[in-house]
Amino acid sequence: MKKLFTWYGVIAVLSLVLSYVFYGSRGLYGMSLGLGSTAFNFIAFRAAMYVVGKTIEETKRPDAAGVFGILALFIKLPIWCICAMIAQRAGGAVLNCFLVGLGLVYFAAIGWAQAKNR
């Protein structure tokens, strides 16, 4: 599993470098918006599901980290939508690279799920 996350890091850095090489600072801006907002989306969902599972198992109130996990669940969609609107208004390479970054994170989630089920 560590090897998989190492490859994810390499792919993220490589995608940021390639977006800068091909599209300049606008491409880097769009790719970082896409990767960052979608990664936050998955991390917040994962944290919230962990808190819900922990609360159901132990039947006690969540601590401060649990409250942050639930808050992150509620703010993840607005953050993602705001980043998408910023990319759309900037247009051109920003929007294209934002969508590629979004796709990379979703493909990484699919790969993680497949690796976890083996």
Image: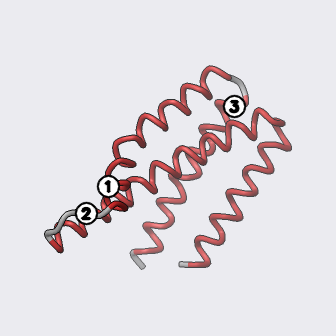
User: Is residue 17 toward the left or the right of residue 86 in the image?
Assistant: right
Where residue 77 sits, quadrant-wise, is top left
Q: CA distance from mark 3 to mark 1?
A: 34 Å
Type of residue at label 3? Answer: Val
State which tag comes first along the sequence, 3 or 1: 1
Which residue occupies 54% across, 25% down?
A: 85
Please tell me whether mark 3 sits on a helix, a strand or a loop: helix
Which residue occupies 71% across, 24% down?
A: 92
Type of residue at label 2? Answer: Pro
Could you tell me residue 112's position as x and y percent?
Answer: 48, 67
In this rendering, which labeled residue sits more in front, label 3 or label 1?
Answer: 1
The residue labelled by disc 3 is 94
User: Is residue 90 toward the left or the right of residue 64 in the image?
Assistant: right
State which tag comes first along the sequence, 3 or 2: 2
User: Disc 2 vs disc 1: Cβ atoms closer than 8 Å?
Assistant: yes
In this rendering, which labeled residue sits more in front, label 3 or label 2?
Answer: 2
| Picture mark count | 3
Could you tell me residue 95's position as x and y percent?
Answer: 64, 30
Identify which residue, 54 or 14, lies in the foreground: 54
Residue 67: mark = 1
| Label 1: how many Cα within 10 Å (few below 14, some 14–19, many 20+) | some
| Label 2: how many Cα within 10 Å (few below 14, some 14–19, many 20+) | some
Please tell me whether mark 1 sits on a helix, a strand or a loop: helix
Identify which residue, 113 or 26, lies in the foreground: 26
Q: CA distance from mark 2 to mark 1?
A: 7 Å
